[in-house]
Image: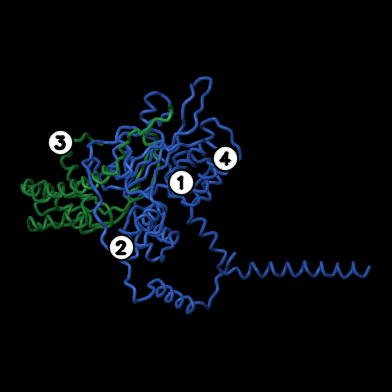
Chain colours: A green, B blue
Amino acid sequence: MKDTTHDDLARKTWMSLLARAPEGRAAALLDAAQARPAFTWLRAPEIGTTMVRGRAGGTGAPFNLGEMTVTRCALTLSTGEVGHAYVQGRRKGCAEAAALVDAMMQTDAGPVLRASVLDPLDAEMTAAKATRAGKAAATKVDFFTMVRGED
Amino acid sequence: MYVAVKGGERAIENAHAWLAEERRGDRDVAELSIAQIREQLSLAVNRVMAEGSLYDPDLAALAIKQARGDLIEAIFLIRAYRTTLPRFGASEPVDTGAMACDRRISATFKDLPGGQVLGPTFDYTHRLLDFKLAAEGETPAAPSRVAEPGDVPHVTEFLNREGLIEEAVHDDTPPPDLTREPLEMPADRALRLQALTRSDEGFALGLAYSTQRGYARNHAFVGELRIGTVPVEMEIPELGFAIDIGEVTLTECETVNQFKGSKTEPPQFTRGYGLVFGQTERKAISMALVDRALRWEELGEDFVGAPAQDAEFVLYHADNIQATGFLEHIKLPHYVDFQSELELVRKLRREAGADQVQEAAE
C-alpha cells in the first residue's frame, strides 16, 4: 500500500461517501447538476461480494464475519480521466453515477460537483445519522439513587 | 442411497404451481412487498442475513417472501445465491469501537462513559399482545435528545487498564475461511468464531443455555452489548488505498467470565466474544457464551465432557443448512435401500418364526 497522499485522501473521502449513499441519491443529484459526459467502460458494472472481517474481542485476531454485496465499475471519460466505484449492495445505476462523479471530480468540474453532489449528499447522510443518534440518546438511562438500604 | 426415479415430472410441476398459489394466499388480502418485509420484519431479515452469511437486506427480504416465512429455507436460498457471486476481496477488520450505537448496555457497570443506552429494545415491555397493532394507525415519532459526539469506549478497556481482564492482543494473521476450505479439527478461534456467527440461532441458544445451567459453567456477565452501524473499509487494488465500501449494522457482545490465575499470572477475568450481522442480540450473547466455553483448552481449564466444550460437536452441528440438508434428504426416495431392509427383516422373521414353531413342538 503506497502512502496516502493529500489527493488520495480527498478521493478516498468522496468515494467512501458515494459507496454509502442511499439508493438513487448520487444519480439524482448528479443529473440535477449537469448533463452526464461521454464515457467508455473500463469495467462494466459487476455485482460481487466482500468478505467482512471482525476481530476476536474487538481488538484481537481477525475472523471472517460474512460477506456483503458490492457493485463495482470503472470508466474513462472522453477527456481521459478514469473513474472507479465500489458501492454497497446490488446497484449498477448507483455504481455508474459514483464512477462518473469520481472521474468528473478529477476535472475542472470538480468544485461545482462538490457543491452540487458531494456536499448535499454528505449533509443528508450526516443529518440521517444525527436523527438516529438523537433517538438513541433519548433512551439513555439517568440513574439516581433513591434510598440506600443499609440503615 | 437414493436412486433417480422417473415419472414424477407432472406431479412436481403441479406441486410447485400450487406452492406459488399458497404462497400468495388469499387474493383478497394485499400482497406483501419486499420493502414491507425489509422495513417491518427487520429482525427476521437480520437473522437471514446473519445465518445466510450475506449482508443484503433486500435479498434477505426476497428470500423470506419466497420461503413463505420459513427462515431456514430463506437462509438456504441466500447461501445458494451467494455462491454465484464473485468475491472482490476481504475488508479491513471492522472497528466496533467506532460504532454509531443504537443500543449499548452493560450488566457489570452502572455508570460508565457513554452511559447505558437502551435503544429500540423489547426489554421492559410486558409481553402482552398489543391489539392496537391489529388496527391500522400512525406510530408517533420517537422522542429525541441531543447526542454526545464521539466514539463510545468499550467496557473491557476499563478493566484492561487495571489489568483485571485478559487482553485481546492485536494480531493480523489472515483468518481461515470455512466457505473456501472444508471445516477441519482442530479449529482455531478465528474459525470457531466464523462458524458461530453463521450458526443456527436456536442451536447456539440451547448450547449457551446449557453452560448457564452448569454444563461447562463459566459464569458469564454481559460486560457489554452494543448494536449499531460500522463502516466497512476495503483496500482497492487499482487505487492503492482503502475506501469505505459500505456500512453494516452489527451486534457485539463481550462477556466477562470467571477469573483464573496461575503461579505466574495473578487472577484475572476471561472473555467470550460474539459479533453478528444485524440487530441479533440473542444470537450475539449465545455466541459469546459458546465461544468462551470452547476456549477451555487455551485457558487451562478441564474438559468436563460438556457439549458446549466439544468443538467438533458444536461446529459440525451448528450449521442449519448442513443439518437440514441431511435431515430432509431422508424424505427423498430411498426405495432400493428400504427394499433391501425389508427383505432382511422378512428373512429374520422367517428364521425366528421357524424357531418358535420348533420350540413349541418340543
Q: Look at the numbered discs 4 and 3 and tell me whether their residues touch, using CB distance below 8 Å.
A: no
Q: Position of residue B211 (x, y in %)?
A: 53, 41
The residue singled out by tag 2 in the image is B36
Given contact means CB atoms under 8 Å apart, are the residues at marks 1 and 4 in contact? Answer: no
Q: Percent position (x, y) of residue A70? A: 29, 52
Disc 3 is attached to a residue of which chain?
A
Which of the 4 image quarters holds residue B103?
top left
Same chain check for tags 2 and 4: yes
Q: Above or below — where is A148 with respect to B311?
A: above
Q: Nearer the viewer, mark 3 or mark 2?
A: 2
Residue where numbered disc 3 is placed: A6
Chain letter belonging to callout 2: B
Measure the C-alpha gap from mark 2 to mark 1. 29 Å
Residue A23 x %, y %: 22, 57
- Amino acid type for the residue under numbered disc 1: Leu
Tell me the kind of residue under disc 2. Answer: Gln
Structural crowding at the residue carrying mark 3, measured as other residues with C-alpha within 10 Å and reported as few (<14), some (14–19) or many (≥20):
few
* Helix, strand or loop at mark 2: helix
- Residue B196 image label: 1
Eye-nearest disc, 1 or 3: 1
Left or right: B345 in relation to B119: right
The Cα–Cα distance between marks 1 and 3, rounded to whole angstroms, is 41 Å
Q: Which of disc 4 and disc 2 is earlier in sequence?
A: 2
Q: Chain of mark 4?
A: B
- For marks 1 and 4, give the CA distance: 21 Å
Nearest to the eye among marks 2 and 1: give it: 2
Question: Quick one: SS at disc 3?
Answer: helix
Q: Looking at the picture, do discs 1 and 3 lie on one chain? A: no
Counting residues from the start of the chain, the first of labels 1 and 4 encountered is 1
Q: Spatial distance from mark 3 to mark 2, Cα to Cα?
A: 43 Å
Give the residue at mark 4.
Answer: B214
